[in-house]
Amino acid sequence: MSGCSSRTHARRFALAFATGLAMTTAACSTLAAQTSAQPVGARPTASAPADSALDAATRSLASQLRCPVCQGLSVQDSPSELAQQMRDVVRQQLENGKSPDEVKDYFVARYGQWILMTPPAAGFNWLVYSLPAVVLVIGAGMLVVLVRRWTTVPPDAGMQADPNASGTMR
Amino acid sequence: MKWQRAVVAVAIAIPSIGLLGFGLTRDPGSIPSPLPGRAAPAFTLAAFTNGDSARAATMDSVRLAALSGDVVVLNFYASWCLACRDEHEVLRTIGARYAGTDVHFFGVLYNDSPDNAIRWLGEMGTLPYPSLADPHSHTAIDYGLYGVPETFFIGRDGRVAYKHTGPVTPDVLIGKIEQLRAAKRVAAGGAQ
């Protein structure tokens, strides 16, 4: 009698645990995909030997700017003509002594914050950064509550030998 | 218990569906420009064709600063751009209407060669105003261009008043121009 109950209990816990694990993995991989989509800075190109600091600075900055004529590509990664010309503008402005932030401001003044691959974490944009964490916490909370509810053996369960009774449990 | 669950499900589903529905009404290709209200980026560009207006015939290069106090309409176009064909007749007609007034139209060629553009204009009909070459798209980038056609309306105060994305219509063109022309009359009337 008690053996049967504990086996059901263990099976139920395993099922709940597996479900929880799958959900957490899914949530984490979504989060990881989101963060990995952001530019990591300068990306060395295959055919680039020893580059000057200017080239490196241009690449780093261009990979933080969004290409206006592409879907989800940076100015650095896009082969389009406009992106090429924008890289030239970036390079020229850096050459003329502008700081990377000043060059970024130049593009933001013309294209808006849209041009930045990573939106600044300020104002409404905070939502983009905080929401995944908030959803993860809520999910974890729900998981704890649900797993506890699923795995708690109601007091009358031990009295019933019939495993079918679990279907009508409240 | 059952109806409570239904209420929760509906309370989650309705805003989610609403948000997705709102997303469908938005065009991810249209980027809001921060330019309107700001000073129009200065440029000096060479005209590769003067169009057929008498006044334009004397211009070799165009400097935006020299036109301050007047209304300027900048139309970015290219011979490879299909949507530019749709607005071409509108620009020809309305451009001709304002020839010789305090409203200056300019075409700015975007990622195209003047030779191609001249051939295209010969095919489509020449414009009544000059077309300017923008060799490395510096002016296009200065204006935050992301495609053609795009039309910028610059007021008498030298500020970008409005940016139109896509083929321009007669209503938009005349409406915005008249609004900007009227600005001076109001200012002059207030000063007297």
Image (cartoon, coloured by chain):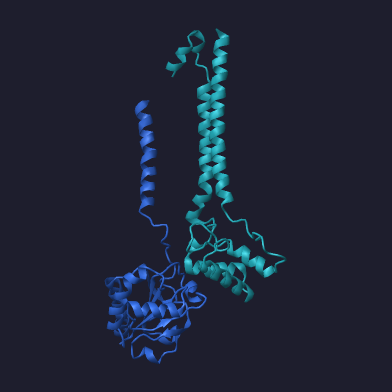
Q: Is residue A18 visible?
A: yes
Q: Position of residue B160 (x, y in %)?
A: 40, 75
Residue for point 36% across, 46% down: B18
Query: In the image, is residue A93 above or below residue A168?
Result: below
Q: Is residue B45 left or right of residue B21?
A: right
Chain B drawn colour: blue
* Image quarter hosting the C terminus of chain A: top left
Q: Is residue B154 visible?
A: no
Residue for point 29% across, 75% down: B89
Query: In the image, is residue A32 above or below residue A24?
Result: below
Q: Position of residue B117 (x, y in %)?
A: 41, 78
- Tell me which corner region of the image, top left, top right, bottom left or bottom right, holds residue B56: bottom left
Query: In the image, is residue B1 above or below residue B90?
Result: above
Q: Is residue A155 left or right of residue B56?
A: right
Q: Position of residue B32 (x, y in %)?
A: 42, 63
Total number of numbered labels? 0
Chain A drawn colour: cyan
Residue for point 38% across, 85% down: B69
- B11 vs A38, nearest the viewer: A38
Q: Is residue B7 left or right of residue B65?
A: left
